[in-house]
Image: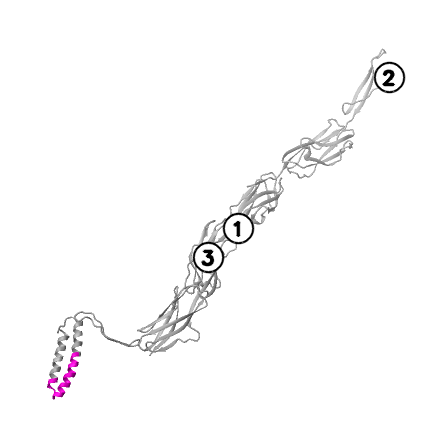
């Protein structure tokens, strides 16, 4: 004998047949042996050739999708591995797998679940491959999905405010956020931070807690209220679900403010007589700040406000630009003696308002009165002198010169004050002596001028006629003795009359001779004398009584 062994390797499933033919030298050659068998095999049937995921927010994980493998063959299916590969393999991941290492009997299944976590926006792709013992291994399922994401586009990366007066609020500026991405933008908070966060404040805010769909916007308005001068900074931050969160907008501005610089903190006036007005002194206000200085009022107040008065005032109601000035002039007119004080206050928009300048000055006065133990009345005879003792007291450190006069003296009398003036710098009490000198009655002989040529005109002729009449009267008188007496007396009287008439006649001729007179002196009576002290427009007086007998 001889033998042939035969194997069966079906190339396909199902019944297979063949024959083993012996070609030999025996009758009936060739001799044949029929061969028959059935081919069996596992067959992979996938639930789908591809899996497409819905649009998925970048960096978030989708719900799982499941790929099912059915062994639709007639032999066991052995799966060695189920793995994800391809271009964006990292964006897809198995979440469950009953296939890897499994033997799947005919008509049985296994499954693999896959999730999608896009790492970037846009189309993403990969594949799930099964390495198995079925024809066509590995068997693959295409995986695809689109990554979506919100994107923040800010209207500006920074906001700059104009210079703003400190402690005042600017007009609002608005920051707009646009969702330029492909997914909803969710903004959880909008906060202000940075170095000077307190100087900036949100107004209207439509972003906090908002969900902004693609291509839509929200906005936040911000104001600037600087708390100090100089550059100020802050930031507006949006905490959201977009890449790069938080998104910030830088904010900046400069605080400006006026500043008051006074020409001095105080003004001292020289000593001034009460009820008289000093020369003006000027207070200058300089704006040493960086913003306009607005002065609403400049007013005088304080203990003795009424003793001080404004003159020229260029400050009240003025707007003083930086580095410029305004001024107020002030005078001092003390209403009483001694130290006087007040202040000039500027109500303005600068820090520390109101700003004040202190005023001080000393009011001066003097008084005139009778000296201690003396009397203001005196009685004298004509020709005598009356003396009064007075005193002058300077009040408030008097530094003026006082001049004294005496009025009211009667005719034929003089009144003098000694000293007639008191120089500046006098202090304490100064003694004054008032002296009234009167004139006694007297008879003085005439002073005759040279006699002009005698002419019997006018009064001269009248004198001659009177003399002639007297002589005729005497001749008619009875008795010779009587005639002689009358004649003698008449002759004397006539001579005197002729002399008087002749002098009158000479006077009528135009000469200027003196004549005899009787001076009765200071008239008797009671008189009021006024002693006056005067200094720079201020006067004080006292009265004296003089009786002349």
Question: Between disc 2 and disc 3, whose residue precedes?
Answer: 2
Q: Farthest bottom residue? A: 479
Q: Which residues are magenta?
A: 474-495
Residue 481 belongs to magenta span: yes
Q: Which coloring applies here?
A: one colour
User: Tag on residue 166?
Assistant: 1
Q: Residues within 10 Å of mark 3 (few under 14, many from 20)?
A: some
In the displayed structure, would residue 404 be above or below residue 32? below
Comparing labels 1 and 2, the label whose residue is closer to the camera: 1
In the displayed structure, would residue 396 be above or below residue 288? below
User: Tag on residue 297?
Assistant: 3
Give the tally of numbered discs.
Answer: 3
**Who's the residue at 37% across and 77% down the image?**
378
Of residues 335 and 131, the one drawn nearer to the viewer in this rendering: 335
Can see residue 317? no
User: Tag on residue 3?
Assistant: 2
Q: Farthest top residue? A: 25
**Image coords of residue 251 (percent x, y):** 56, 44
Of residues 224 and 129, the one drawn nearer to the viewer in this rendering: 224
* Secondary-structure class at tag 1: loop
User: Magenta: predominant secondary structure element?
Assistant: helix
**Image coords of residue 41 (percent x, y):** 77, 27
In the displayed structure, would residue 51 be above or below residue 198? above
Of residues 14 and 261, the one drawn nearer to the viewer in this rendering: 261
Comparing labels 2 and 3, the label whose residue is closer to the camera: 3
3 and 1 marks in contact (CB < 8 Å): no
Q: Quadrant of residue 280?
A: bottom left
User: Tag on residue 371?
Assistant: none
The answer to whether 52 appears left or right of 540 in the picture is: right
* Secondary-structure class at tag 3: strand
């Amino acid at each position: 004998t001889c033998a042939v062994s035969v194997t069966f390797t079906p190339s396909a499933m199902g019944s297979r047949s063949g024959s083993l033919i012996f070609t030999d030298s025996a009758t009936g050659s060739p001799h044949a042996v029929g061969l028959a068998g059935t081919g069996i095999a596992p067959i992979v049937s996938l639930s789908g050739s591809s899996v497409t995921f819905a649009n998925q927010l970048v960096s978030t994980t989708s719900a799982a999708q499941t790929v099912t493998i059915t062994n639709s063959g007639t032999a066991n299916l052995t799966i060695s591995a189920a793995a994800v590969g391809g271009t964006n393999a990292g964006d897809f991941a198995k979440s469950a797998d009953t296939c890897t290492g499994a033997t799947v009997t005919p008509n049985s299944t296994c499954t693999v679940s896959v999730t999608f976590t896009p790492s970037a926006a846009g189309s993403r792709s990969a594949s799930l491959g099964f390495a198995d013992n079925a024809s066509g291994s590995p068997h693959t399922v295409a995986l695809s999905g689109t990554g979506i994401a919100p994107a923040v586009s800010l209207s500006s990366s920074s906001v700059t405010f104009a210079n703003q007066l400190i402690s005042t609020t600017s007009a609002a500026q608005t920051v707009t956020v646009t969702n330029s991405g492909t997914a909803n933008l969710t903004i959880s908070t909008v906060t202000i931070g940075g170095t000077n966060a307190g100087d900036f404040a949100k107004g209207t805010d439509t972003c906090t807690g908002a969900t902004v769909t693609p291509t839509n916007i929200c906005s936040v308005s911000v104001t600037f209220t600087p708390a100090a001068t100089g550059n100020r900074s802050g930031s507006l931050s949006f905490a959201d679900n977009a890449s790069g969160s938080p998104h910030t907008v830088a904010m900046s501005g400069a605080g400006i403010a006026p500043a008051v610089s006074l020409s001095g903190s105080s003004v001292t006036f020289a000593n001034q007589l009460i009820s008289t007005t000093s020369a003006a002194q000027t207070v200058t206000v300089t704006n040493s700040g960086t913003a306009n200085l607005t002065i609403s009022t400049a007013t005088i107040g304080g203990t003795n406000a009424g003793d001080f008065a404004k003159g020229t005032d260029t400050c009240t109601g003025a707007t003083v630009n930086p580095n410029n000035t305004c001024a107020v002039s002030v005078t001092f007119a003390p209403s009483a003696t001694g130290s006087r004080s007040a202040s000039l206050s500027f109500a303005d928009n600068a820090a520390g308002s109101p700003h004040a300048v202190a005023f001080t000055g000393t009011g001066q006065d003097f008084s005139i009165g009778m000296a201690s133990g003396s009397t203001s009345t005196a009685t004298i005879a004509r020709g005598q002198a009356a003396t009064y003792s007075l005193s002058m007291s300077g009040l408030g450190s008097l530094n003026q010169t006082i001049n004294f006069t005496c009025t009211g003296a009667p005719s034929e009398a003089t009144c003098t004050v000694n000293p007639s003036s008191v120089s500046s710098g006098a202090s304490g009490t100064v003694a004054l002596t008032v002296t009234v000198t009167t004139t006694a009655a007297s008879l003085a002989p005439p002073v005759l001028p040279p006699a002009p040529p005698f002419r019997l005109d006018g009064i001269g002729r009248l004198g001659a006629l009177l003399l002639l009449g007297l002589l005729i009267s005497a001749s008619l008188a009875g008795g010779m003795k009587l005639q002689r007496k009358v004649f003698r007396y008449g002759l004397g009287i006539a001579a005197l009359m002729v002399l008087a008439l002749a002098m009158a006649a000479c006077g009528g001729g135009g000469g200027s001779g003196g004549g005899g007179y009787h001076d009765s002196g200071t008239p008797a009576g009671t008189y009021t004398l006024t002693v006056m002290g005067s200094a720079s427009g201020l006067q004080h007086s006292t009265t004296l009584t003089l009786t002349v007998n």
